[in-house]
Amino acid sequence: MKERTRWWDFAACVGTDPDLFYPTRDDSPAEALHICRICQVRTECLSHCLLHGETHGIWGGTTEAERDAIRQAVTECP
Ligand code: SF4
């Protein structure tokens, strides 16, 4: 049995349809966000996304618009 050592080994989205996490403009992100809500590595996922400049998809239980707001708030901090 393979040992789980990286944060994404514990992701709740493992084995789900990746398309859920990259909704098109007409798709709802609700199902992906629901999966994220029970994910034990949500903080790690969001940190990874922000640190690596991931702009597309659902990461750490956030939408693209929500992460844009986070980045904007951070850049406006004195
Ligand atoms: S927070 Fe969401 S996208 Fe990130 S690993 Fe967990 S389930 Fe996947």
Image (cartoon, grey):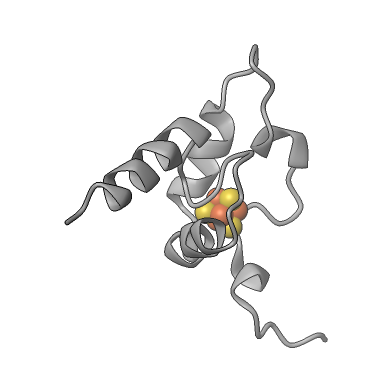
Looking at the figure, which quarter contains the C terminus? bottom left
Residue 55 placement: quadrant:
top right
Q: Nearer the viewer, residue 45 or 54?
A: 54
Q: Nearer the viewer, residue 12 or 55?
A: 55
* Residue 40 x %, y %: 47, 64
Compared with 45, 68 (above or below) is: above
Residue at x-position 42% and y-position 63%: 43
Looking at the figure, which quarter contains the N terminus? bottom right
- In this view, the residue farthest toward the left is 78
* Residue 59 x %, y %: 55, 48
- In this view, the residue farthest toward the front is 78
* Residue 22 x %, y %: 69, 34
* Residue 14 x %, y %: 71, 57
Compared with 55, 30 (above or below) is: above
Residue at x-position 50% and y-position 57%: 50
Left or right of 29? Residue 47 is left
Residue at x-position 52% and y-position 35%: 64
Residue 12 visible: no
Left or right of 56? Residue 44 is left
Residue 53 placement: quadrant:
bottom right
Residue at x-position 49% and y-position 38%: 34
Left or right of 65? Residue 7 is right
Residue 33 visible: yes
Left or right of 61? Residue 57 is right
